[in-house]
Image (cartoon, rainbow, N blue to C red):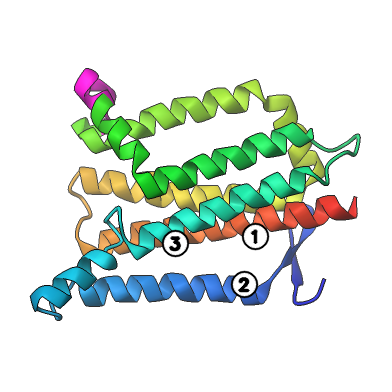
Amino acid sequence: MRGTQSFALGGGAIPVRPTLLAGLLAAEATLVLLYFVTNSGVLPGALGHRLGVLFDLDAEQSVGAWFSASQLLVIGLTLWSASERMGGADQPAPWFLRLAGAGFVFLSADEAAAVHEALSRAVYKASPSVAPFGHEHSAWVVVYGVAAFLLVAFFWPQVKRFWRAFPAPSALGLAGAAVLLAGATGLESLGYLHVFMGHVEVALEETLEMVGATLMLLAALAVKDAAGRS
């Protein structure tokens, strides 16, 4: 494939698009830089306030939220497209790829529309004890965690087929998910506990989430490439 390089992971080779990877990482670094510049108070007045909201990585309606939602949407569409290339006896069922793609489309909508924040408030209001650390914004972690566990358990045969068919992309995608969760739940939890707060905490949290999504996007593209060659 033109414009790709490969590296070994999980017992196989993953084609990586260096231009795409470099572009996404550069965009993420730029968003973090703009966040610090526009939220540090160096731009006073109404313009400074508007730019601060626009590039606030901790805000819902911001460029950062749009970027993260876009990455998740592309992952979902890529997996859905890859389902059209499935059909081998040793590959997962096409419907499983479509289901996984739909899941990422939902996560994209969640990021853009702040679904999990609204869910957290509703769950906390109904049962405050469910929320970790006693913080209403953390209740979504329990709900989504339980849902993810049940989905993986129910579709475990397809999960195993997916891993066997695409071991290297699966390993990369799992690494990306771990990086994303380290930011979304790990660093965020430190904020709830008042251990690590402020602009640096927000920047690191969102950076991990964006980089994790980038790794998962590369994994999804690798799955689509591998399925097309099977």
The x, y position of residue 2, in whole percent, is 80, 76
Q: Is residue 212 left or right of residue 36?
A: right
Total tally of numbered discs in the picture: 3
Q: Of discs 3 and 2, which sits in the foreground?
A: 3
* Residue topped by disc 1: 218
Q: Is residue 125 left or right of residue 109?
A: left
**Front-most of 73 and 224?**
73
Between the residue at mark 1 and the residue at mark 3, the CA separation in whole angstroms equals 16 Å
**Front-most of 194 and 61?**
61
Determine the residue positioned at 30% across, 56% down: 61
* Residue topped by disc 3: 67
The x, y position of residue 184, in whole percent, is 38, 47
* Residue topped by disc 2: 20
Name the amino acid, label 3. Answer: Phe
Asked whether disc 3 touches disc 2, contact meaning CB atoms under 8 Å apart, the reply is no
Residue 105, picture quadrant: top right
Between the residue at mark 3 and the residue at mark 2, the CA separation in whole angstroms equals 14 Å
Asked whether disc 1 touches disc 2, contact meaning CB atoms under 8 Å apart, the reply is yes
Name the amino acid, label 2. Answer: Leu
The x, y position of residue 117, in whole percent, is 30, 39
Q: Is residue 220 left or right of residue 198?
A: right
- Asked if 2 appears above or below 113 in the picture, the reply is below
